[in-house]
Image (tube, helix red, strand yellow):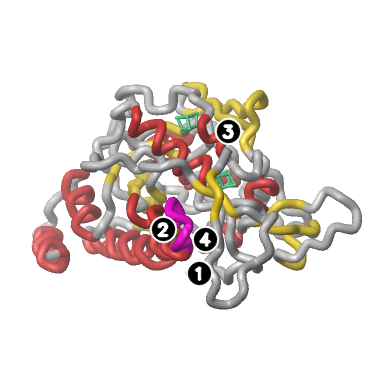
Amino acid sequence: MGIKIRDSLKEASDQAAMLTALDVKAYAKELGADVVGIAPIERWEGAPVQMDPRQIMPDAKSVVVMGFRVMRGSLRGIEQGTYFSNYSSMGYGGITYLYMPLVVINLSKMIEDFGYEAVPMGHQSDWRAIDNEGGMRDGYSRPVAPGRAAPDVMVHLRMAGYLAGLGEIGYSKVFLTPEFGPRQRLGIVITEAELEPDPIYDGPQLCNRCMACVDNCPGNAISRTETVKVTVAGRELEWGKLDCEACGIAFCGGQVVEEEGVEGDYSASIYGKQITRNDITPFNRKPPNLYNTGQAVCGARGCLRACMVSLESRGLMKNKFHKPFRREKPWTVDWSQEPPAAGEPLTAKEAD
Ligand code: SF4
Ligand code: SF4
């Protein structure tokens, strides 16, 4: 199906036809993107140099931003407490490192068939010159010339989603769309093609500051009181300050051992800290990563699941289901019990 569209567009290209935003969006969806928006490059005016797409492509005219939905079903096994790997693989690493690259690469090929250079970009953030807080990584790389960025530039994908009109950034710092709420990952194509832009999202407000993300984050990683404010495209955005280290530890199902002498048996160390298991995981040892960074043992309990439940209860997501996501009280493991012997069941207790 996709090949058919691509061939017909290529023929159009051979006839020196115009590449339109509608063509690009239709093809991106045909390839597997769930939502697509286009931002003109001018909306990055004033962006930090390390996040500016023009540092990658000086003659860029447009940024095509695509959202790839995280299926609600990929979170079902974690909600049941019986199947954690599905979200980490099919809802996280697999989308980021397998599905999304195929789409952004093929969309870029289509745009280049029309004679416009296109940069496919997913999550190559491991090479970026900035750290999680936006500061420069110490001694990592240096600017290629005065006034230019140090490699690697990493375009802020959530900001790109906002600038392309796909939705808003929630208090949790997770990107929210009217289609899927917090359930998507974002990829972009930066191109020299001038495409008709979408307006910045102006639909119903998605984040109502309900703080369900804060209350349910197992790492207490999202501040209730401290916020971050940025101004983009003349608008002020604000979200809760995220403690990336706390998130990174809880994300893997761990928690920092506070008391002296307590053995951290969950993982040798994360961020150089002694770690034990968090009560949100029934695993005695941290499971291996899936698809590079798929290790979301926390199941995004706060920033995704609780947020989704909040948006669902307010009827805000267009991707509707016959049954609500949350059908019973979430569970947690009772660590006061001895681990079960092989073949014996583990008893779970209800959360408070
Ligand atoms: S859980 Fe509530 S406060 Fe947090 S991002 Fe979602 S809607 Fe906003
Ligand atoms: S990924 Fe997990 S630990 Fe990190 S903010 Fe979301 S709920 Fe909290």
Q: Determine the image quadrant of residue 77.
A: bottom left
Alpha carbon distance from label 2 to label 3: 21 Å
Residue 215, label in figure = 3
Q: Quadrant of the N terminus?
A: bottom left
- Spot occupied by residue 37 in the image (x, y as percentages of width and height): 30, 41
Q: Quadrant of the C terminus?
A: top right
Alpha carbon distance from label 4 to label 1: 16 Å
Q: Earlier in the sequence, mark 4 or mark 3?
A: 4
Whether 83 is among the magenta residues is yes
Please give the name of the residue rendered at 39% of the width and 51% of the height, measured from the top-left corner: 188
Q: Earlier in the sequence, mark 2 or mark 4?
A: 2
Q: Amino acid at mark 1?
A: Leu
Please give the name of the residue rendered at 59% of the width and 38% of the height, measured from the top-left corner: 48
Q: Which class describes the residues within 10 Å of circle 1: few (<14), some (14-19), or many (20+)?
A: some
Disc 2: which residue: 77
Frontmost of labels 4 and 3 is: 3
Q: Which residues are magenta?
A: 78-84
Q: Amino acid at mark 2?
A: Gly
Q: Amino acid at mark 4?
A: Gln
Residue 124, label in figure = 4
Ligand 2 within 8 Å of disc 4? The answer is no
